[in-house]
Image: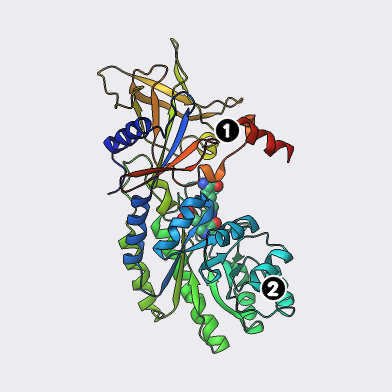
Amino acid sequence: MDFIPKDEISESFIQCVQSGLIEKGLDTTLIFYDFDFLTSRINALKAAFPANTMHTVAIKANPLIKILEKIINTDIGVEAASEGELFLAEKSGFHPSRIVFDSPAKTRNEILLALSKNIHINADSFMELKRIAELREQINTSSKIGLRINPQVGYGTITATSVAGNYSKFGVPIKEYRKEIIESFEKYEWLTGLHIHIGSQGCSMGMLLTGFEEILQLIIEIENRINRKLLFIDIGGGLPVSYDHNQEPSKIFKYGAKIQELLQKYQHAEILLITEFGRYLHANSGYTISMVEYAKQYIESNTLIIHVGADLFLRECLNPGQWLHKFILLDKNGIIKSGEKKLKYNIAGPLCFAGDIIARDIELPIAEEGDYLVIYDTGGYTFGMWSKYVSRMFPKTILKTGNTFEIIRNREKPEDIYSFWSG
Ligand code: LLP
């Protein structure tokens, strides 16, 4: 299954209203997440990659604790990119050996913390390697350490999420620093692997594979020089997903097969692979339903005012045209609206700025106050990027597993907003 079927969305909504999980009038927005869908993606990922792969999921894509806690049972790990995410990972029960710590801004304290818990660290720069070298002197550790390389394969179609162009704030640029990269493996015998991440959405599978091949060639050069085998390659995440449902869904099996082919070609089939997917696992596994508060029908334009905007859909609002979600409309009872007559609507959020528009010119059946708009594929990089602007309250979040629904995060209340701003 590539996407959650619309009938299932409507039925889930109706069922949650009937069982009282959704309180009409109070729950103006709902986030739904389907755990079985996530499991199917995790299983596909496991089947597509070699057995000696450690899969981790990027916490930033979806930091909801209940989901992290359930992910543990699927036997994959997590990629953490801040002290906060390290804490979430451990509190949710991930064993330190299943945590990979990335970030371009690791403080000395954070590095020390990760070393003390034997957590895998990918250093982002030579400066960070130097810090790790100093801190390793102070502590006994078995943390695996990798170095992030920018393979400089070019920019994808979305600049803000492309991190392997000629310039990137991440990683050591391979073209200019190949020699120094190799030398650092000579210098630090505890440096045992390489890390790359090409970008998130907007970078084609071809780009990801070019980056991987660059790294394999580099590994061979390093190994020849230092006369020891490296232990791992962390390929990051970045497999794009289809938002408008017109693009071909990502072919995880094709990607996995190509990776295996390249490993064979460069005689590295034995090396440990690490992956850090976020979007591929999460994005299509969730959707958002927001009540139409006002349907503004003017001569020149029609606008639906709903209850989420740039607070949940930052990229969609800031980079219109690049994140084309699919929408459907439910009536006030949760039944899919069809109707012959359709209008084009701008989908606007509740925030106080003109750019708070998730999508423009979306053709929908005639909408009215009290309908519910479904925004597809919001399981990744939406609530993870939640903004408190205009002190809006985070929506109730419902998890579906099999035929059971549970609230995994309550709707925020005005007091929660007060405590956030009062500290
Ligand atoms: N590994 C590293 C080091 C990353 O920086 C990321 C994402 C991932 C893995 C996971 O990438 P994925 O498989 O999810 O594409 N909507 C956000 C996306 C930023 C991506 C950040 N890094 C944004 O627009 O800022």
Three-letter residue code for mark 2: Ile
- Check disc 1 and report its element: helix, strand or loop: loop
Q: Is residue 294 above or below residue 218?
A: above
- Residue 360 versus residue 119: which sits nearer the camera? 119
Find residue 341 and report its horizontal and vertical position in percent: 28, 16
* Residue at image location 39% in from the left, 59% down from the top: 206
Q: How far, Cα to Cα, is label 1 from label 2?
A: 40 Å
Q: Quadrant of residue 73?
A: bottom left
- Position of 109 compared to 22: left or right? right
Q: Quadrant of residue 261?
A: bottom left
Q: Earlier in the sequence, mark 1 or mark 2?
A: 2
Does residue 162 appear in the picture of this structure?
A: no
Find residue 83 and report its horizontal and vertical position in percent: 65, 58
Q: Residues within 10 Å of mark 1 (few under 14, many from 20)?
A: many
Q: Is residue 315 above or below residue 113?
A: above
- Position of 338 compared to 57: left or right? left
Q: Quadrant of the C terminus?
A: top right
Per the image, the residue denoted by label 2 is 132
Numbered label attached to residue 311: none
Per the image, the residue denoted by label 1 is 393
